[in-house]
Image (cartoon, rainbow, N blue to C red):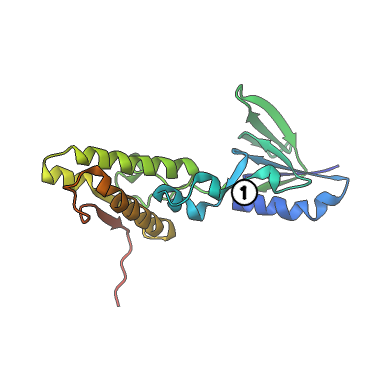
């Protein structure tokens, strides 16, 4: 039996599993296993729409088991990879049970870490926008700030509360700026009749500038 183990349930891992599902997994002597921390995959380019409230989380999620016919899904956390023994240790379940997965071929699709570009304070205090949980927390944080600002009588303090800074001017940063802008401005009328539609401010921070 040829054993292929794929680590990661993001774009890379899922696409690799889908390809193997419709090709070599059809053979009786090939076993393909996908290990993912979640039992669903998320279309991350639309996370900002969840943060803005334009989409429900379920609209950008797809259960992994619906995507495959022959690939085995194992939901858990990867604890160790032993290259010498060709084995992966996975912890799964509420009791963190451990299981060793032997493999002949290993595919790594574990994603990436956020690059904070050495901007002081961002890693310690900023919120991310890489997961479904991040998008939900970001939406809750913006609404909580609007709640606090509605109770603030000092104009300068209220102005600071309604200032949102986004670090990074790439795709995720630009889309997140738009999501926060839409959420804040659409929600503002519900937080007091004296609020101006121009009250929220957004500040985009990026390390590169372009001159012509």
Residue, x 60% and y 53% (percent of image)?
A: 11
Under circle 1, the secondary element is loop
Task: Kindly indicate the quadrant of the structure image that contains residue 73.
Answer: top right
Residue, x 29% and y 74% (percent of image)?
A: 211
Residue, x 28% and y 50% (percent of image)?
A: 164
Left or right, residue 34 beside residue 178: right
Q: Residues within 10 Å of mark 1 (few under 14, many from 20)?
A: some
Task: Kindly indicate the quadrant of the structure image that contains residue 158.
Answer: top left
x then y, percent, for residue 62: 61, 47
Residue 168 in view in this figure: no
Q: How many marks?
A: 1
Q: Residue furthest right?
A: 28
x then y, percent, for residue 205: 30, 56
Q: Residue furthest bottom?
A: 212
Left or right, residue 72 beside residue 110: right
x then y, percent, for residue 134: 44, 42
Residue 43 drawn above or below residue 147:
below
Residue 178 drawn above or below residue 65:
below
Left or right, residue 159 beside residue 211: left
Pick the residue in front: 190 or 5: 190
Which residue has dot 1 on it? 109
x then y, percent, for residue 208: 33, 63
Residue 47 in view in this figure: yes
Quadrant the C terminus occupies: bottom left
Pick the residue in front: 93 or 108: 93
Left or right, residue 72 beside residue 139: right
Pick the residue in front: 49 or 54: 54
């Amino acid at each position: 039996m040829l054993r292929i183990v794929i680590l990661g349930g993001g774009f890379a891992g899922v696409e690799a599993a889908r390809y193997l599902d419709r090709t070599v997994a059809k053979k009786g002597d090939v076993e393909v296993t996908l290990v993912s921390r979640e039992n669903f995959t998320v279309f991350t380019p639309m996370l900002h729409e969840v943060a803005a409230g334009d989409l429900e989380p379920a609209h950008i999620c797809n259960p992994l088991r619906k995507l495959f016919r022959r690939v085995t899904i194992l939901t858990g956390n990867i604890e160790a990879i032993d290259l010498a023994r060709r084995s992966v240790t996975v912890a799964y379940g509420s009791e963190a049970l451990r299981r060793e997965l032997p493999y002949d071929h290993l595919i790594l699709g574990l994603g990436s870490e956020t690059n904070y570009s050495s901007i002081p304070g961002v890693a310690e205090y900023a919120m991310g926008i890489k997961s479904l949980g991040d998008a939900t927390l970001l939406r809750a944080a913006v609404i909580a700030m609007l709640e606090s600002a509605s109770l603030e009588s000092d104009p300068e303090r209220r102005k600071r509360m309604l200032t949102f800074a986004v670090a990074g001017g790439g795709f995720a940063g630009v889309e997140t700026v738009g999501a926060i802008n839409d959420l804040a401005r659409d929600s503002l009328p519900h937080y007091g009749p004296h609020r101006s539609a121009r009250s929220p401010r957004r500040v985009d921070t990026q390390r590169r500038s372009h001159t012509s």
